[in-house]
Image (cartoon, rainbow, N blue to C red):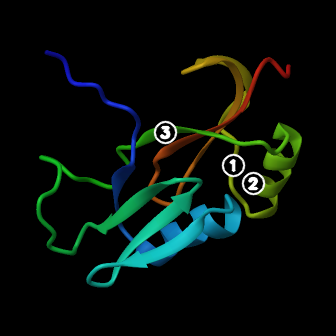
Amino acid sequence: MTLCIERIDHIVITVNDIEQTIWFYCDVLGMEEIEFGDNKKALGLGNQKINLHEKTRDLSPVAANPVPGSLDICLISSSPLDEISAILEKHGIEIEEGPVLRQGAQGEITSVYCRDPDGNLIEIANTGNHL
C-alpha cells in the first residue's frame, strides 16, 4: 500500500514582522491577506495559502527549528518578467539574479530571484522559455 499525495494545501513560514511580510507578499506580489482562527494571518494565492507564524508568538505544533529567512520558494506568475522586474524595482526590491532559464516541476521556466523582508529567497517565474 502506498500513500497518494495530491497537492500542497498550505505551507508555513516563520517571520520577524507579520505586517512587513504582508506588505511584501500582498502589496508587491499581489497575494491576498487572510485572517483565520485566533488572530492568525496567512497569504492567499489561488487555491493555496501560506500561513504566517511570527517568531515571537508561541504556537504549536511547529517545525523543529522555525527561523525567519530559511524559505526558498518558486512562485509561478502569468505576469511577464519585465513587468515583474519593474514592480520589484518600484518597491525597492533588488533582483538578485535573472531572468534565467530553470527547470520547474512541469518543465522549463524563466525566473527572477529576490528576497522578502526576512531574507527568504523568492523565485518568480513564467512557464516556458522566455529568454
**Residue at image location 79% in from the left, 47% down from the top:** 84
Report the residue marked by disc 2. Answer: 88
Q: Which mark is residue 73?
A: 3
Q: In the rendered structure, are the residues bearing label 2 and label 1 in contact, judged by CB atoms less than 8 Å apart?
A: yes
Which residue is labeled 1 in the image? Answer: 94
Q: Position of residue 7 (x, y in %)?
A: 41, 36
Q: Is residue 123 above or below residue 56?
A: above
- Depth check: give the residue in front, 108 or 98: 108
Mark 1 neighbour density, 10 Å: few (under 14) some (14–19) many (20 or more): some
Between 37 and 118, the one lying in front of the other is: 37
Mark 1 or 3: the one toward you? 3
Residue 117 horizontal/vertical position (percent): 51, 60
**Residue drawn at (46%, 57%) of the image:** 49
> What residue lies at 53% left-to-right and 53% top-to-bottom?
47
- Looking at the rendered structure, the kind of residue marked 3 is Ile
In the displayed structure, 73 sits above or below 69; it is above
Q: Quadrant of the C terminus?
A: top right
10 Å crowding of disc 3: few (<14), some (14-19), many (20+) = few
- Assign a secondary structure to mark 3: strand
> What residue lies at 11% left-to-right and 64% top-to-bottom?
60
Q: How many marks?
A: 3
> Rounded to the nearest whole Å, what is the CA distance between mark 3 and mark 2?
17 Å
Q: Considering only order in the chain, which callout, 2 or 3, is on the residue closer to the N terminus?
A: 3
Discs 3, 2 touching: Cβ within 8 Å:
no
**Is residue 127 shown above or below 35?**
above
Question: In this view of the protein, which residue sits in the foreground, 91 or 40?
Answer: 40
